[in-house]
Amino acid sequence: RMKQEGGRSFRFYEAQMDEQIEECRALTGELRGALERREFILHFQPLVSARAATIEGFEVLLRWQHPTRGLVPPDEFIPLAEQSGAIIPLGQWVIREACRIAAAWPSKLTVAVNLSPIQFRHSDVVAIVRDALQESGLAAERLELEITESVFLEATQEILDILRTLRGMGVSLSLDDFGTGYSSLSYLRRAPFTKIKIDRNFVRDLPDAKTDVAIVRAVVQLGTSLGMTVTAEGVETLAQQTCLAEQGCHQFQGYLYSRPVPADEAEALIRKPRLNLVNPHAA
Ligand code: C2E
Ligand code: MG
Ligand code: MG
Ligand code: MG
């Protein structure tokens, strides 16, 4: 009986797998031409100063407005775009569009763009960034590039050279999702990062999880002593914010302040912030 059931659940599992593979194949096909059909849109999420409780900039988060599937989140299509190579033109479009939109914001605000490791390996990121800055007139100092540690899995020396060139142009570099990947302190030492973004896994269970409090405190100390900004991702509650502020975290991002919103709503936030901004020092 056991065996029979096992066989049945295996066939069920197999059928599910087939369905998933078919789904991926379909999405990959639909990804082709989606850029030309103007199906992508940028959303923006505020980066909030811990000290002054003001908006310092926005992170750009890509969305796919699919004609029948609705708004597809990046986790569902970025991996497919990476596998198929579609990430190259798509990533270039994101950088150009982000710079174009941010150029219209007040000049103290920054814009942060996520980059895929594939873009580093298979396109000229330096030229693409330089062109986007020139075209938009955005000052290089206002552009941040967010990179995860997975970028260092291959060709580390080449990647380091690219990062140093970008930094030399005045662009800021953030180490995204810090603590989740193959975190190596040697990257922090060798690459010219200006910001560490603590992954929301370490923020979720604050302030109760004492281990996470200790990790956050250590990362803030490390980042601060290396002259970097330390940002916490995924801040959803005031209790998390208070705890992060106590550990000396410099910048917050999360649903507590705002979800990622379209460009017009981001501009409304800039003009008249309606954020859940509680100045921990004024409180
Ligand atoms: P990420 O760069 O770490 O971006 C942060 C993610 O956390 C975003 O998910 C954001 O919506 C979500 N988030 C922000 N605040 C909160 C919060 O308080 N609670 C929770 N639960 N989540 C929060 P999103 O937009 O779905 O993006 C997922 C990932 O997709 C990003 O992670 C990034 O790695 C990737 N991605 C997004 N846009 C691009 C892009 O233009 N290019 C590339 N290469 N990757 C992108
Ligand atoms: Mg990011
Ligand atoms: Mg992140
Ligand atoms: Mg992430």
Image (cartoon, rainbow, N blue to C red):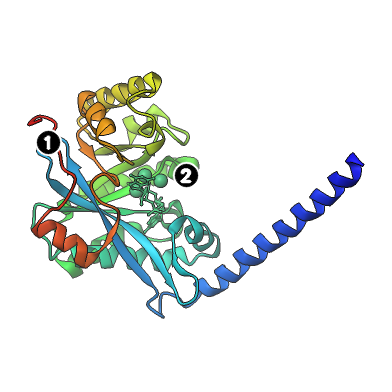
Amino acid type indicated by mark 1: Asn
Q: Relative to residue 127, is residue 259 depicted above or below?
A: above
Q: Is residue 98 left or right of residue 74?
A: left
Q: For residue 270, which quarter of the picture?
A: bottom left
Q: Is residue 188 visible?
A: yes
Q: Position of residue 108 (x, y in %)?
A: 9, 52
First of labels 1, 2 by sequence position? 2
How many discs appear? 2
Q: Relative to residue 193, is residue 127 depicted above or below?
A: below
Q: Which residue is mark 2?
A: 155
Q: Is residue 32 left or right of residue 39?
A: right
Find numbered disc 1 in the image and state the secondary structure of the residue it sits on: loop
Query: What label does residue 279 carry, if any?
Result: 1
Label 2 neighbour load within 10 Å: few <14, some 14-19, many 20+: few
Amino acid type indicated by mark 2: Ala
Q: Is residue 114 left or right of residue 258?
A: right
Q: Residue at x 77, y 55 (%)?
A: 12
CA–CA distance in space, label 1 to label 2: 43 Å
Label 1 neighbour load within 10 Å: few <14, some 14-19, many 20+: some
Q: Residue at x 57, y 73 (%)?
A: 29
Q: Quadrant of the C terminus?
A: top left
Q: Position of residue 75 (x, y in %)?
A: 47, 55
Q: Position of residue 58 (x, y in %)?
A: 22, 53
* Viewer-proximal residue among 1 and 279: 1
Q: Quadrant of the N terminus?
A: top right
Q: Residue at x 15, y 48 (%)?
A: 55
Circle 1 or circle 2, nearest the eye: 1
Find numbered disc 2 in the image and state the secondary structure of the residue it sits on: loop
